Every structure is written in C-alpha cells, then in structure tokens.
Image: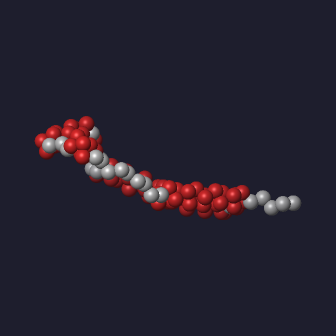
Amino acid sequence: MARRCSSSVAVVAICALTVWALASFTMPAFVVAPTSLEKQQLDIHQPERVAALAAVAALVPEAAHAANNGYALQQLFSAIFVIGLGPAVLFWIYFNKPELL
C-alpha cells in the first residue's frame, strides 16, 4: 500500500507561497516623477497643512488612547495566550494523535 503523507504537500505549498510573497516584495516598482505642473498643484501652504493634519487627528480620537494601561495588559495577556497555545496544541497532538503529524 502506498504511503500517505499529506504533510509534504503542505510543506511544498507553504514554501511556494513564501517564495511568491518574497518575490512580490522584492519586485522593482517604477514611479514616474511628477511634472512641474503637478508639483505646483501638490504644493500646500503651511497653515493649510496644519489644518488638514488637525482635521485628520480630530477624526480619529481613539488612536490617542490606544496605548493606555488596560489595552497594553490585554495585548500582553493575548500574546502570552497565543504563544503558549501553539506548543500546547503541538504537545497534545504529539502525545494523543501522533498520526496527524
């Protein structure tokens, strides 16, 4: 009977996906420099730039409170849970269902 091993197929698929993702990050991108007319249109005076930045900051007030202590503790405990859960699941599979590996 032929050996059934789906993990090698999964490893090949993950490796191919990783190579494709890295290749897309390293692909050269070419952007044409703006013409002088476009540069003049994009030139914003300092008071308007400050007003635009203040308007954007006023639209997202929650971002200023994202790093308070409660949120930081929640992030810390979530990270501990996720990092601890991975090995726990792998140990459970290793000792209880080794045929999955």
Residue at 43% of width from left, 54% of height from top? 29
Q: Quadrant of the N terminus?
A: bottom right
Vertical position of residue 72 compared to residue 87: above or below: above
Judge by depth and name the residue closer to the eye, 50 or 6: 50
The answer to whether 4 appears left or right of 54 in the picture is right
Q: What percent of the width, then of the height, locates residue 63?
A: 28, 44
Between residue 48 and residue 34, name the one nearer to us: 34
Report the front residue among 49 and 80: 49
Rendered residue at 65%/60% (across/down): 12
Apparent side of residue 40 relative to residue 17 in the rendered image (left or right) = left
Query: Looking at the image, how many numbered discs can be counted on the residues?
Result: 0
Q: Position of residue 89 (x, y in %)?
A: 58, 57
Q: How is the image coloured?
A: secondary structure
- Determine the residue positioned at 52% across, 56% down: 21
Judged left or right of residue 67, residue 99 is: right
The quarter of the picture where residue 93 lies is bottom right
Give percent across and percent down for residue 37.
24, 42
Could you tell me if residue 27 is visible in this image?
Answer: yes
Q: Is residue 47 above or below residue 82?
A: above
Q: Is 63 left or right of 48, judged from the image as shown?
A: right
Q: Quadrant of the C terminus?
A: bottom right
Farthest-out residue, front: 36
Relative height, residue 1 to residue 48 (above, below) = below
Instruction: Evaluate whether residue 61 shows in this view.
Output: no
Residue at screen point 69% across, 58% down:
9
